[in-house]
Amino acid sequence: MVLENGTGASKEEIKGRIADARGLMREAGLDVLLVIGRSFYDRMGSLTYLTNHFPPFPPGAFSDTVRGMGHGVLVLPIEDEPLLFVDHRNYRAEMVHVENVQVEANISAGLVNQLGRLGAEGARVGIAGEDIMPATMYIDLTSALPDAQFSNANALVEQLRARKSETEVAYLKRAAEIVEVGYAAIFDAVRPGVSESDLCAEGHAAGMRAGADFVRYVRVHSGPWASWGSRWPQATQRKLEAGDLIRFDYVGAVEGYGFDVNRTAVVPGKKLDKSVEEMLELTVATSEASMGAVRAGAKALDVHEAASRFLDDNANGAGQYLFPMAGHGIGLETVEAPIIRPDNAMILERNMVLCVEPQFVLPEVGGTNIEQMVLVEDDGCELLTTTTTRPWAE
């Protein structure tokens, strides 16, 4: 899951993050914070941020005695020592920077017992990761501790995670380098007759050889599927034909920090229709316009608005075809705050890392997508992804 001698965040950095979280707990009036995470490739972000633990298993079915497989939970009191519950003894002990770790098959029971030891029967308990806590676990807690006041504390840790440290920025830059290697292998294999699955395999293999922890998926949507931003499965046995558009989404992580980059290619051997070629160029230009709005102090909605305005001004009012989501933050999870939507007034801060991806589909023509990873700076942004945005022209 990590490089052989990798360490993720340092013990000192984790200690500082816990101190910052406790400061926000005091502001929110919380006595205890429960921080839950799920599976290293999925939704481990807040848990990993405060512990450096990556739950290694996928979530499993609950039973009377096994409640929490594929999860980990940090119990963070405002004063006492934190305790991390893990679901299996095979965790990376040398990486986890919380002194007290308890292996527990029944994490529900462990949480109830620990909260009891802390005298938290009537405490104010925040849950960071409430949206991913299994309902069974939540019912176990609220039933055993009816006088405790449980509340959603997702935003408490998410606001800390949004602005990246120097260590995190370095990992995210390394993640962007993996993208370059992966797409080079993919584009080199694009030709009539190969399958979507062939290209998917090229991306997975190249990313892993280049040092990725894992490649979560390489979406390959070609021909009639090219306008689909998300389709199951990630790739099929469909054979590419000359002139096909291919839309890719390349997602994975390095040292736990993600890469998520969309590109569009064209299978050589057939001249593109002029309307399709214009749509491809419009996609690139819209992406550039959207990135032009990224800077510290801007709002997330400004980035969306820049793309919408550009489409209106340069494509006969095509802003109406822009998807509501035009990007997102990235870090320990693929999709983090801020979400770039027209209704999100969250202020962009220096050292946030964003995936900017304005998407649209033009009637009777189709759509594609360009996604760029950028580092927010005081006066603009640094482009982290160097993979060509016009592979059809090269």
Image (tube, helix red, strand yellow):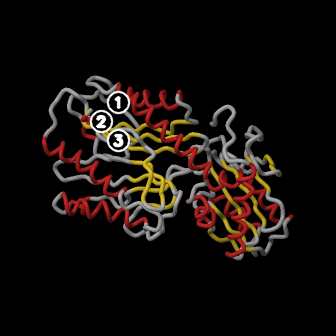
Residue 294, given in percent of the width and then of the height, sits at 41, 60
81 lies above or below 231: below
**Where is the C terminus found, in terms of image quarters?**
top left
* Kind of residue at badge 2: Pro
Q: Nearer the viewer, residue 79 or 12?
A: 12
What is the number of the mark on residue 202?
A: none
| Quadrant of the drawing holding the N terminus | top right
Q: CA distance from mark 2 to mark 1?
A: 8 Å
- Residue 263 badge: 3
Give the Cα distance between marks 3 and 2. 8 Å
377 left or right of 32 in image? left
* Rendering coords of residue 59 (x, y %): 62, 46
The residue located at (39%, 30%) in the rendering is 184
Image: 346 above or below 194: below
Q: Secondary structure at mark 2?
A: helix
Mark 1 lies on residue: 187
Residue at (28%, 25%) from the top-left corner?
191
- Of the numbered discs 3 and 2, the one sitting upstream in the chain is 3
**Does any portion of residue 106 appear in the rendered image?**
no
Q: Position of residue 81 (x, y in %)?
A: 83, 60
Amino acid type, callout 1: Phe
According to the image, label 2 marks what residue? 391
Labels 2 and 1: the sequence-earlier one? 1
Q: Amino acid at mark 3?
A: Arg
Measure the C-alpha gap from mark 3 to mark 1: 10 Å
Q: Nearer the viewer, mark 3 or mark 2?
A: 2
Say what secondary structure mark 1 lies in: helix
Q: Quadrant of residue 307?
A: bottom left
